Image (spheres, helix red, strand yellow):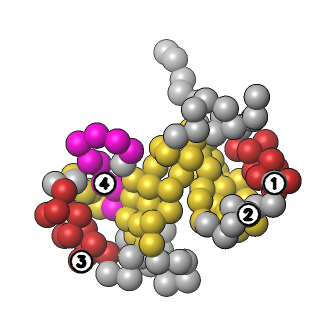
Amino acid sequence: MPPTSKGNGFVHLELNSPDLEKAKTFYNTMFGWEITDMPAGPGMVYATFKPADGPGGGMFSINDAPTGWLPYIGVEDIDAATAQARELGAMVFVDAQEIPGVGWMTVLNDPTGCRIAFFEPAPTSVS
């Protein structure tokens, strides 16, 4: 079984838009998505969205990143999945990187040139 087992569905989607306010208005009006502005790094605005069902995600505007949607696929082991993707011919742009308090991500192009990302959630603690 691959190190990325567990169904490997899309778990998060992100939109990089050159006009974040226009994108937020469009998706909220068109689909009724709940959109919430979140704290982000310097010079960056990040908003989360949640549809009535299915995966939610984020919206942001970064000039040096490709404009468009980036789907995140859930994995159990980000390092093993990233290594396996490389072995299968993927080009990794952002190697396994921690998202503090959330989990880990990798951004890559599959061997056909399509951009995807992997996501491993942080373990949840049981009290």
Residue 11 locus on image (x, y percent):
48, 44
Magenta run includes residue 54 = yes
State the CA–CA distance, disc 1 to disc 3.
38 Å
Residue at image position (39%, 53%) is: 57
Res. 101 visible in picture: no
| Residue type for callout 4 | Phe
Q: Are marks 1 and 2 in contact (CB under 8 Å)?
A: yes
Residue 71 locus on image (x, y percent):
50, 56
- 10 left or right of 2 in image: left
Residue 28 locus on image (x, y percent):
18, 61
Residue for badge 4 = 49
- The disc, 3 or 2, on the residue closer to the chain's N-terminal end is 3
| Residue type for callout 3 | Lys
> Which image quadrant: the N terminus?
top right
- 43 left or right of 96 in image: left
Residue for badge 3 = 22
State the CA–CA distance, disc 4 to disc 1.
32 Å
- Check disc 4 and report its element: helix, strand or loop: strand
| Residue 111 disc label | 2
| Residue 59 disc label | none
- The disc, 1 or 3, on the residue closer to the chain's N-terminal end is 3
- The disc, 4 or 3, on the residue closer to the chain's N-terminal end is 3
Give the residues drawn in magenta, as a range: 47-55
| Residue 88 disc label | 1
Q: Which image quarter: residue 26?
A: bottom left
Q: Nearer the viewer, mark 3 or mark 2?
A: 2
- The disc, 4 or 1, on the residue closer to the chain's N-terminal end is 4
